[in-house]
Image (cartoon, helix red, strand yellow):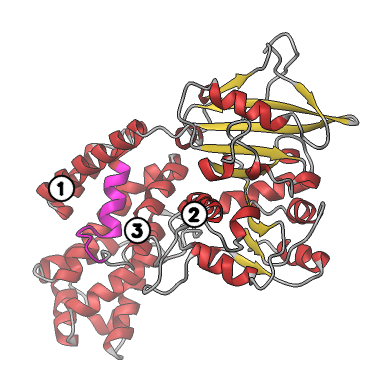
Amino acid sequence: MKLSSNERKGFYKALIDAFPEYTDLKMMVDLEFDLNLEEIAGKDKLKNVIFELIKWAESTGKLEDLIRGACEYNPGNTKLKEFIQIKKLIDILKPYFDKHKDKVIVAYKLSLPDILTDKDKTPKNAAELIYDSLRFPPQEKDKYSPLEKFVINLLLDESLSCNTDLEIWAKENIGEDRYKQRITGLREEKKQERREVYPGLFVAILQQGESYIVKSWLNKDIAQSRSGKKSYYKQLTKNEQAEIKIDRQLSKVPELVRYWIDNSGVDIKQIHVFLPYELMNHPIDSWKTIDGDDETIGEFYEVIIRCSERMEGTNPRIYRWKTKGSKLKNKLNKLAADVFTPCCGDNHKIIENHCKQDDIIAVKITNVFQDKQPGTMLWKSAIPLALWIRERIDDVSNENELDQLMGKRSKQEEQITLRDISKVVKKARLKYFASSTPHIGHSLCLLWDDPDLLPPEQRITQEHL
């Protein structure tokens, strides 16, 4: 039996707490092993002796005897009890970590505090995961620690078929009443999530030779479809056509979007428009919801720009975008102000090179660039999330406006999480139409290109889906 690095540290700290005096440690070794402590670990400072004692026990195969003996000699020590229970949990967890690592990591990251830690870190083994969870106490007004949340999240995953050992551990260490209360609460939350449907309209503008075509899908529930189930998508047509030719000015598209909205039969929440990167500055949020009316889709829906070149293909930039996009998954509960990187300056090439860095996954572009430049920069740098403004407004600081939009880092000011940024952008667009003063809402662009949220690839003709 060998301890991992994290387990060794935990046992070391427990022994120091359980045996603060050298004589107590010497007596325990004498009684349990009929050996002289000095012969095993020398005569030195207590912490050095304990370190050598653990090394000796590991090298001679007597580690289990040392753990058992220490607990029997000092059965009331809290640190030793905690170490034993954590060791037991690690041993229970090892098979799950080896066979179902992805699901275990998901349960772990769901349990961590939303703001206190960076959720990008992925533990290498069960011991590292458990000891990492122990670093964080329960958040304010939360009676469950991250470790307790992790165990319960794992037990809630029905696909894992967690054995009774894990459930017994949970009841013993979390408390049966608290465990049942948490399980019941989370199950109710999951039922509520299943009841809340979030439909979306997906419209793809694709280049076909010298011209363009448009295709569309109804997504029955955006939140659920991130699981990769293609059954959530339904292809839409107009006059039995699934591919409709359009001009470069996209003049037909607003009418088509209105048609698909009116005939969807559901309350659409989001509209995703996939544009060729050279058309990303197109004012899609200004399309009218009703012909002849002043109301725009940007006021009424969460309108999100996507890059149609990323829908399929083997361009290296697509692989880079998927890598960057995956990093956003665990940042949805982080403050938007902490995730977005400011991109300032008049030289779009410099900004583009800056955005190519691996750690930059979300940008706010404060300068106004025209024509193809925003899309070109975002395509070449593989950025999945971006905010920018199409038009310049006199006496308005774009940087200040974007900062205000996504909230500040201070607890005294409004805090906007990344998860809510599309709702916040919609609110800003609505504010413009209700305001008599110049506002960024009339030209605010949001690109959120989620690689897990793509319509299914299909072979389509005009006659058949």
Query: Mark 2: which amino acid?
Result: Val
Name the quadrant of the N terminus. bottom left
Q: Residues under labels 2 and 3: Cα distance?
A: 36 Å
> Disc 1 and disc 2: Cα gap in Å?
42 Å
Task: Determine the secondary structure under disc 3.
Answer: helix
Q: Looking at the image, do the residues carrying marks 1 and 2 touch, with CB atoms under 8 Å apart?
A: no
Disc 1 or disc 2, which is closer to the eye? 2
Q: Residues within 10 Å of mark 3 (few under 14, many from 20)?
A: many
- Image height of 454 relative to 386, above or below: above
Residue 442: x and y in percent read 62, 53
User: What's the magenta region?
Assistant: 140-154
Q: Which mark is residue 171?
A: 1
* Three-letter code for the amino acid on which mark 3 is drawn: Ile
At which x and y percent is residue 278?
Answer: 81, 46
CB under 8 Å between discs 2 and 3: no
**Which of 319/209 is in front?**
209
Please state which of residues 443 and 29 is positioned toward the viewer in this rendering.
443
Query: Which residue, given by chain and number where applicable, does mark 2 sit on?
Result: 424
Q: Residue at x 34, y 58 (%)?
A: 130
Q: Residues within 10 Å of mark 1 (few under 14, many from 20)?
A: some
* Residue shown at 15% from the left, 43% from the top: 180
Asked if residue 113 lies left or right of residue 138, the reply is right
Instruction: Please identify the quarter of the rendering in which residue 133 is found.
Output: bottom left
- Farthest residue toward the right? 210
Give how far across and how far down residue 443 sits, in percent.
66, 54
Q: In the shown orientation, is residue 324 left or right of residue 414? A: right
Residue picked out by circle 3? 130
